[in-house]
Amino acid sequence: MAITEKSRHELYRRLEEILGPDEATTLMEHLPPVGWADVATKDDLRSLETRLDARISVLGSELRTEMANLSAELNSSLRTNTFLLVGAMGAIGGLFTAVASLT
């Protein structure tokens, strides 16, 4: 049987007749707002935690791999750019030397 607002209200009215308004309100506040089948159990939460831990571990591993790849690419680019700059500086130095010897 599905719990509806109508059935909850009928239960409250009956409890109010038997226990009084304060006690009926207190008891109704301790009931879940939905059916018990929709309430998560500790086992449900443990299962969710296990699945989330596994996903986080996989994502962490993928992130570390991507960071290592990025670092390798950056090191390669820096090495290439350094050699190009040193070569360009040498060529400019040679030009200055040639111009200086002509004058």
Image (cartoon, rainbow, N blue to C red):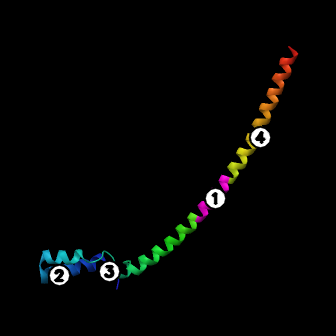
Cβ atoms under marks 1 and 4 closer than 8 Å: no
Question: Which residues are drawn in magenta?
Answer: 61-71
Give the percent coordinates (x, y) of residue 88: 79, 33
Residue at figure coordinates x 73%, y 40% from the top left: 82
- Mark 3, residues whose alpha carbon is within 10 Å: few (<14), some, or many (≥20)? few
**The N terminus, quarter of image:** bottom left
Residue 3 numbered tag: 3
User: Which numbered disc, 4 or 2, marks the residue closer to the eye?
Assistant: 4
Give the structural element (helix, strand or loop) at label 2: helix
Residue 7 visible in the displayed image: yes
| Residue lying farthest to the top in this orientation | 103
Give the structural element (helix, strand or loop) at label 3: loop
Counting residues from the N terminus, which is met first, the one under dot 1 or under dot 3? Answer: 3
Q: Quadrant of residue 57?
A: bottom right
Type of amino acid at the residue the image marks with label 4: Phe
Residue 15 numbered tag: 2
Counting residues from the N terminus, which is met first, the one under dot 3 or under dot 4? Answer: 3
In this rendered view, identify the residue nearer to me: 14 or 83.
Answer: 83
Q: Does residue 43 show up magenta in the picture?
A: no
Residue at figure coordinates x 13%, y 81% from the top left: 19
Measured Cα–Cα span from mark 2 to mark 1: 61 Å
Residue 83 numbered tag: 4
Residue at figure coordinates x 62%, y 56% from the top left: 67
Counting residues from the N terminus, which is met first, the one under dot 4 or under dot 2? Answer: 2
Residue that badge 1 annotates: 66
Type of amino acid at the residue the image marks with label 3: Ile
Type of amino acid at the residue the image marks with label 2: Leu
User: Which numbered disc, 1 or 3, marks the residue closer to the eye?
Assistant: 1
